[in-house]
């Protein structure tokens, strides 16, 4: 079963169980995936797991950015809701790597690419995107790569 089929199944189960919170979150994710398909002129009948992971990752990233802003504004009620949505959406993402695992992967990429200066950041990030896409927070990855290049 593909991730998209799993989302559809989970949406039906949420409807049957009258789980409004899960249902609205899954509908949000499904709508974002459908919008992605339309914008990229993709076939609507089949959606690859890569597309689901990309869209779900963007949703989580957006939610985390919103959490920061809501926390600054003292809106803890909204922060709670977003955390629950992140938890639901994260079910469709690969297991996130720890900082140590990310650093290990980046070291392997550095050994492969052999960067000479900060000018090679693009080459490294391209390789990192292939290896860690959906498995790691790319902001953290970028910070680690920048730190290693500066060292």
Image (tube, helix red, strand yellow):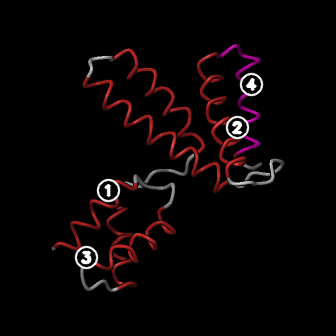
* In the depicted structure, whether residue 101 falls above or below residue 122: above
The residue depicted at 67 percent of the width and 41 percent of the height is 35
The residue depicted at 66 percent of the width and 23 percent of the height is 23
Image location of residue 18, percent across then percent down: 70, 13
Which mark is on residue 7?
2
Q: Earlier in the sequence, mark 4 or mark 2?
A: 2
Q: Earlier in the sequence, mark 1 or mark 4?
A: 4
Image quadrant assignment for residue 5: top right
Q: Which residue is mark 4?
A: 13
The stretch of residues the image draws in magenta is 4-19
Q: Earlier in the sequence, mark 1 or mark 2?
A: 2
Q: Residue furthest left?
A: 151
Left or right of residue 30: residue 136: left
Image location of residue 114, percent across then percent down: 33, 86
Q: Label 1 vs label 2: CA separation?
A: 29 Å
Left or right of residue 13: residue 109: left
Q: Earlier in the sequence, mark 3 or mark 4?
A: 4
Q: Main secondary structure of the magenta part?
A: helix
Quadrant location, the C terminus: bottom left
Q: Are marks 3 and 2 in contact (CB under 8 Å)?
A: no
Q: Label 1 vs label 4: CA separation?
A: 35 Å
Q: Label 3 vs label 2: CA separation?
A: 41 Å
| Element carrying mark 4 | helix
Left or right of residue 141: residue 17: right
Q: Which residue is mark 1?
A: 99
Which mark is on residue 118?
3
Mark closer to the observer (3, 4): 3
């Amino acid at each position: 079963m593909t991730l998209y089929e799993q989302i559809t199944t989970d949406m039906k189960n949420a409807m049957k169980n009258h789980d409004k919170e899960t249902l609205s979150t899954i509908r949000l994710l499904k709508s974002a995936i459908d919008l992605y398909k339309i914008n990229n002129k993709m076939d609507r009948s089949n959606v690859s797991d890569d597309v689901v992971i990309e869209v779900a990752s963007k949703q989580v990233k957006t939610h985390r950015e919103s959490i920061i802003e809501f926390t600054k504004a003292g809106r803890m009620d909204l922060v709670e809701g977003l955390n629950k949505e992140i938890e639901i959406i994260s079910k469709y993402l690969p297991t996130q790597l720890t900082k140590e695992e990310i650093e290990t992967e980046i070291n392997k990429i550095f050994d492969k690419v052999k960067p000479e200066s900060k000018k090679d950041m693009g080459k490294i990030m391209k390789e990192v995107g292939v290896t860690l896409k959906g498995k790691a927070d790319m902001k953290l990855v970028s910070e680690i790569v920048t730190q290693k290049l500066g060292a």
